[in-house]
Image (cartoon, helix red, strand yellow):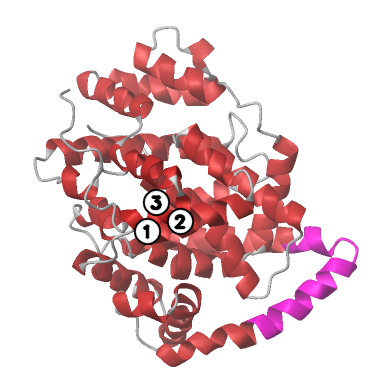
Amino acid sequence: MSKRAYEFADRYVRRDEARRRFGGVADAYARYQLRGDPLADDVVAAIARDPRVGEQVDRALADGMARVPDAAPEVRELFAALDATPPWVDPVTANLGALTYQRIGSAGMFILSAWSLMNGYHSAPAVKPLAFTKQLDARAPRRLAETGRFVTEVSQVDGMARFAPGFAIAVRVRLMHAWVRRMLVSSGRWDEKAWGVPINQADMLGTIMEFSLLVLSGARRMGFLFSRRESEAVMHLWRWVGQISGVDPWLLEHLTTEAHGVRLAEMVHVVQPGPDADSRALAAALRRVPEQLARSPHEQRLAKWVVKYHDGLTRAFNGDAVADDLGIPNKAWKYAIYPTRAIVTPIERVRRIVPGATRLASLVGNWRVRAGVEKMLAGQEPSYRVSRA
């Protein structure tokens, strides 16, 4: 492959400001916009040459590499990395992170949608892979449900253990992203100079930050209370998810603490170029999901209020400028965050002092989220498989 004639993609904006405020980290981060996931990309290329390689991946995930003596070299290299648990991983801390995450319950789905996803949509280059599918609207409920299943499974107790469902889903999503990357690069329509590599390392890290940093911050704004040990445990869990998902270790080092992650998120905000028409189309499609999922007149009436509340959270979390950029209406609903906090915080204070209440809150929250995801999936579980390449 010939050397690129450029060091950075055009999407790296406000470079002087970023360098002044964040030093060499800004340029180092921007270079990751031109990097994919070599281990996963090689496996997908091998599947393209021989579909039987996909079966080897399935067996390795289910039974371990020892049960796949005929595995292709690309599969061996990927699973050598996957099976080498980093020395910094602490399962006890990760399990505390999982229980803390579960405690947020159904509110977490609002945060993921109104902040995590909307925040991601505000970056035009980051949403280009979705835009290229030409299914911005029709697939929105399914995308949200599949994201919910991924987030739910990786945040189970021992969900990231080697043979747990969360681990397997993280690997399958990683390979699915590699397939999309291959498809877009080979399409001849992908503008790498403008947008960087499809689903690049920087955007992959952005997803991990959206599911960790933003969820913690959004939950606090809604009135949830976390000890420092709990919030750092959530960061630890998602750093582990990022490792299995193929994010480069240098990037993940910036998530060793919540404070470090917030600092990097501030820099990412500076260098992002903002939204475009595809961003606004995705935001509009996400807003329509509650009404699309409504199955009765009562649910349809309720969905209209849910959409307004969701708009309010989008504005409260992201700010009016971002919400205006994405075409989010219902400005007055941003004040709904205050009664939400007034309800949640007293409950949280009681939880902290009643024996067993914290564990109960995790159990109830986990059950509610699982039930909601299963309702959205309607019996059609996602496979996250690479069906073609």
Residue 17 in the image: state x and y as whole percent: 37, 58
How would you rate the neighbour count of disc 2 (Cα within 10 Å): few for under 14, some for 14-19, many for 20 or more? Answer: some
Corner quadrant of residue 102: bottom right
Corner quadrant of residue 57: top left
Type of amino acid under label 2: Arg
CB-based contact (under 8 Å), mark 3 and mark 2:
yes
Residue 343 vs 383, above or below: the answer is below
Given the current orientation, which residue lies at the most extreme bottom position?
332
What whole-number distance in Å separates the C-alpha atoms at marks 3 and 1?
5 Å
In the image, 160 versus 272, the foreground residue is 272
Instruction: Identify residue for label 3.
Output: 19
Count of numbered tags? 3
Instruction: Identify residue for label 1.
Output: 17
Could you say whether the residue bearing mark 2 is in a helix, strand or loop?
A: helix
Residue 21's label in the rendered image is 2
What whole-number distance in Å separates the C-alpha atoms at marks 1 and 2?
6 Å
Could you say whether the residue bearing mark 3 is in a helix, strand or loop?
A: helix
Tell me if residue 383 can be seen.
Answer: no
Type of amino acid under label 3: Arg
What whole-number distance in Å separates the C-alpha atoms at marks 3 and 2?
6 Å
Residue 179 in the image: state x and y as whole percent: 27, 36
Given the current orientation, which residue lies at the most extreme left position?
188
Type of amino acid under label 1: Glu
Identified at 62% across, 41% down, the residue is: 159
In the image, 300 versus 112, the foreground residue is 112
Residue 5 vs 350, above or below: the answer is above
CB-based contact (under 8 Å), mark 1 and mark 2:
yes
Q: Would residue 345 be counted in the magenta stretch?
A: yes
Question: Which residues are drawn in magenta?
Answer: 341-361
Residue 287 in the image: state x and y as whole percent: 36, 75
How would you rate the neighbour count of disc 1 (Cα within 10 Å): few for under 14, some for 14-19, many for 20 or more? Answer: some
